[in-house]
Image: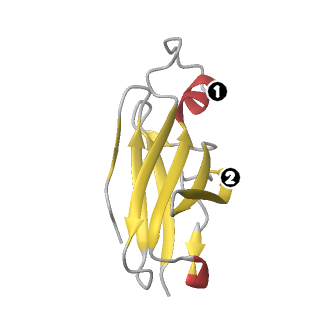
Amino acid sequence: MGTLSTQVMDTANGLPAVGMSFQLESITGGVRRQLRRGVTNADGHTDVLLAGADLASGTYELHLDVAAYFRARGMAQEDPPFLDVVTVRFGIADAGVNHHLPLQVSPWSYSTHRSR
């Protein structure tokens, strides 16, 4: 039984990104379906986003409200902000294994990679 999870780190402040809003969607045949919404917890993680029968092979998008997160922490940003909502589109080929999507983010950059 595979799972999908994520953790967001605030690299501008060297801390987990606590309280960052996110939305997870699946994309099938050009049709988007919202699967989860929420905020990151005290260590920047989400609860397991998908597991078991809910996790299928396919294309997904994770949308993270980066500008709102940094604005709430009093960080000055341009108008419009350089990064507003960061969208990571990724594919899952094997739904039977664990997938972890870590994200490191600042108001000016982000990085992610595949982890298990």
Q: Amino acid at mark 2?
A: Gly
Q: Picture quarter containing residue 110?
A: top left
Q: Quadrant of the C terminus?
A: bottom left
Q: CA distance from mark 2 to mark 1?
A: 16 Å
Determine the residue positioned at 48% across, 55% down. Answer: 7
Q: Picture quarter containing residue 65?
A: top right
Looking at the picture, the colour scheme in use is secondary structure
Q: Which residue is mark 1?
A: 72
Q: Amino acid at mark 1?
A: Ala
Residue 6 in the image: above or below residue 8: below
Percent across and percent down for residue 28 are 52, 65
Tell me the element at label 2.
strand
Whichever of callouts 2 and 1 sits on the residue coming sooner in the sequence is 2
Determine the residue positioned at 49% across, 60% down. Answer: 60
Tell me the element at label 1.
helix
Q: Which residue is mark 2?
A: 38
Residue 61 in the image: above or below residue 99: above
2 or 1: mark nearer the eye: 2
